[in-house]
Image (cartoon, coloured by chain):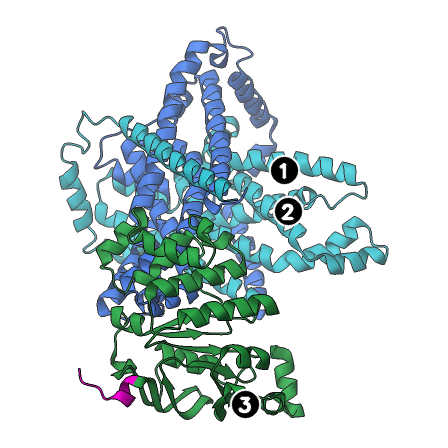
Chain colours: A blue, B green, C cyan
Amino acid sequence: MTFARASLYGFVVLALVSWGYILAATDGGAADLVSPKTWSNAGNFSRQLIGVDSPTRPAYLEVDRWLVTGRLALDTLAMSVLAIVLTGVAVLPTFLSGARNVSNGDLGGAPSRLGTLFYHGVRLAFTLTRAVPELVWAMVIVFFLSPGILPGAVALAVHNYGVVGRLSAEVVENLDPGPAKALRSAGASNLQMLIYSIFPQALPHFLTYLLYRWEVIIRTTVVVGFVSAGGLGREFRLSLSYFHYTDLALLIMWYLILVIAVDLLSAWLRRLVTGKG
Amino acid sequence: MSMNKSDSDHLLVATGISKSFGRVEALAPLNMTISQGERVALAGPSGSGKTTLLYLLAGIIQPDAGELLLAGQNLARQRPGKEKAGLVGLIHQQYDLVPHLPVLHNVLAGRLGQWSLFRSMISLVWPQDRQVAEEALAQMGIADKIHERTSHLSGGEQQRVAIARLMVQGSRVILADEPVSSLDPVRADDMLEILTALAGGSGRALVASIHSPRLMRKHFTRVIGLREGHLEFDIPAAEVTDRVFERLYDLDQSEAAVWGGGN
Amino acid sequence: MGGRELKLLESRRLLTLLLAGVFLWSLSTVDWRGPIIHTGGLAAFLDFLASLFPPELSPGFLGLALSASWQTLAYAVAGITLAVLIGFPLGVIASGSVSGSIRTGLGLAVAVRLILAAMRSIHELVWAVLFVAAFGLSSLTVILALALPYSGILGRIYGELFNQVPEGPLRALRASGASPFRVLLYGRLPMALPDMLGYTFYRLECAIRSAAIMSFVGIRGLGYEIQLSLHDLLFDQVWTLLLFMVGMVVLVDMWSSRVRRSLVS
């Protein structure tokens, strides 16, 4: 308890210093936030978003605008699916060697130098990819890949590789070793043990994490699209810079529809995976 | 391979095997011989070394000292695989099946020692030797559960799956850790009859940890009593009287306090 | 039983096919006719990898990277503190344990849960882009944008934790005549606090990443410097900044996992 308590106090101090720094050393903007001008600007922005003063009909009342942007929403959905599949395909062959109890032979079998090497390599890859946010990966990746759906999906997949990989490896480390050891006494080799026991035990957890991350990914597709120029994100940015605010409102509606749809779908699939309900 | 009569009769020969965990002596040096056709019950309060002895016989843990010969072969020098799996098989107390696999694959896991890696991977998609598993499950009376997820089965059904795996494995020495601990008397009799049938036939034997003198007399040929890692007695099952038994389980006060929490 | 099980198995097989179809469709949306890799993209990629050996290590740049790291950390910490301040009361209401009347308590809880879900459904950077368009760019607008989705997450988790505490002690408090709010204060809160603390520390690590990408709307910090260096094609500087990012995340991760471990024991 003492370390947690010290950490709590430490965090409070850190918070005070951070707020002090932000209010003093940067343009905090506290004065702006209370000025009537800011609030009238904000009011204007929201009126423009709804399109009350606009001479033309707001975009979100035009069926053809819905169809055109719907195409982009589909692209965005495709980006998220591609990202989650790429993540899964990358994690699947590596997460077992990222688990300590597999590499050091706790689950049976002898510890090998190659296993240890793999363990550290995979763990390092998890840490590096996870620590850097999707948007930064996207900024880097657009230097190599042509703009569109793919670089966005790759950027999302690189970050989520680290997230899902680490979680899955931790699941393996906490697995009940009983079934694997029982297989050993039934004459199974190391790899057979992994295939028949560890892998099937970890698979539902792995799929659950993947589906959870899909919910995060769909929210982030738009952000990644700002730089990778695919799907809703690109149009979002353009509408904002051309002051097409009712278009922006329409795009936000599509964004919310996607988020809600994926949340529901993911929850349903997760129930199927865990076999409950 | 030339063996004289007495060697082939002795399926299992342990000379001075012992095991300690840290500073706790789980099993003091022990000599014992099990001949084919024998059904041996291990008795003793929990912590007496029954499970340790079973794990040693199964080759899951290695003895600190002594030698263990199974059908004339040194168990410690054998790598897991076909031969060892064919010699000895263990039903764990918790059954230790893979909960997420269908029953079929948990049963076929008894074949892993004989299968190549490739074949065992193929089997997850196109089950190999399916008939063997079907027959084993039919004998266990749970043929209809073959496609169910193992975690959806009751404890008793899971135990039958574990035994079906052992049938498919075809081990000569069947070891069972507390096989009737969670069963009512009628089912306990059924279970021991199944195990007896499984370990029947030439060249086979059964070793199981059991707590009830009635079951010992009814289903076993011999009883080995253990206490605090030491051999207390090794007698024919017919000689197990309730008195002998009470003495084995009789605890003095200080020990009773220790056991009270554990059971 | 067996029949139902088979049906489930079959429906799973069907679903697998369906998902494979969805994946193929997602592949078809990628424009494969044009070049996947830029002209010169491969060379740029190799150049990028080569720039790691070594990254930019001049004292001046390390100083810059350090101060950028601090800026990002400050925004992350500020965002999380604001998120705790907003998320805590919302979590209390969402747990449905504030009001004596079950009906108003439950009604309020449902409403607040919807609000929390709405806050969570929009990414912090999208909030930031909208807020900056509405209020203009300032530290506070960006911190508010950062805090919104985090409040949504923390509020939901806090609410769930309040409801997961064991009933026994609460019953005892109720029996002694404590109002629901007192039960919360003396029962639910102390029991849920360790888990709340652990989870909040875990979220701090995520907030560092979120703070870094606020560079997109013009906030200084690691993301900002990475953008500048990328713009000038100074990949060795990009690597230095990425490594600082990794280092900071690893440190916070170690801190938060130690906190969680010490809370468990």
Please indicate whether residue A159 sits to the left or right of residue C78 in the image: left
The amino acid type, in three-letter code, at marker 1 is Arg
For label 3, the crowd category at 10 Å Cα-Cα, with few meaning under 14, some 14 to 19 and many 20 or more, is few
| Percent position of residue A120, x then y | 29, 63
Circle 3 is placed at which residue position? B239
x then y, percent, for residue A104: 32, 69
Q: Which residues are the magenta region?
A: B1-8
State the CA–CA distance, disc 3 to disc 1.
71 Å
**Which residue in the structure is indicated by mark 2?**
C159
Report helix, strand or loop for mark 2. helix
The numbered mark, 1 or 2, whose residue comes first in the sequence reads 1
Give the quadrant of the N terminus of chain B. Answer: bottom left
Give above or below for B170 relative to C41.
Answer: below
Q: Which residue is mark 1?
A: C113
Mark 2 surroundings: few (<14), some (14-19) or many (≥20) residues within 10 A: many
- In-front residue for pair B89/A159: B89
Element at label 3: helix
- Co-location on one chain, circles 2 and 3: no
Q: Amino acid at mark 3?
A: Glu
Viewer-nearest residue: B223 or A209: B223
Query: Does C1 appear above or below A119?
Result: above
Q: Residue furthest top?
A: A55
Residue at 41% from the left image edge and 81% from the top image edge:
B38
Nearer to us: label 2 or label 3: 3
Q: Position of residue A191 (x, y in %)?
A: 27, 61
Tell me the element at label 1: helix
Task: Indicate the chain on which mark 3 is placed.
Answer: B
- The residue positioned farthest toward the right in the image shown: C177
> Which of the two residues, C172 or A222, is positioned nearer the viewer here?
C172
Give yes or no for residue B7 being in the magenta stretch: yes
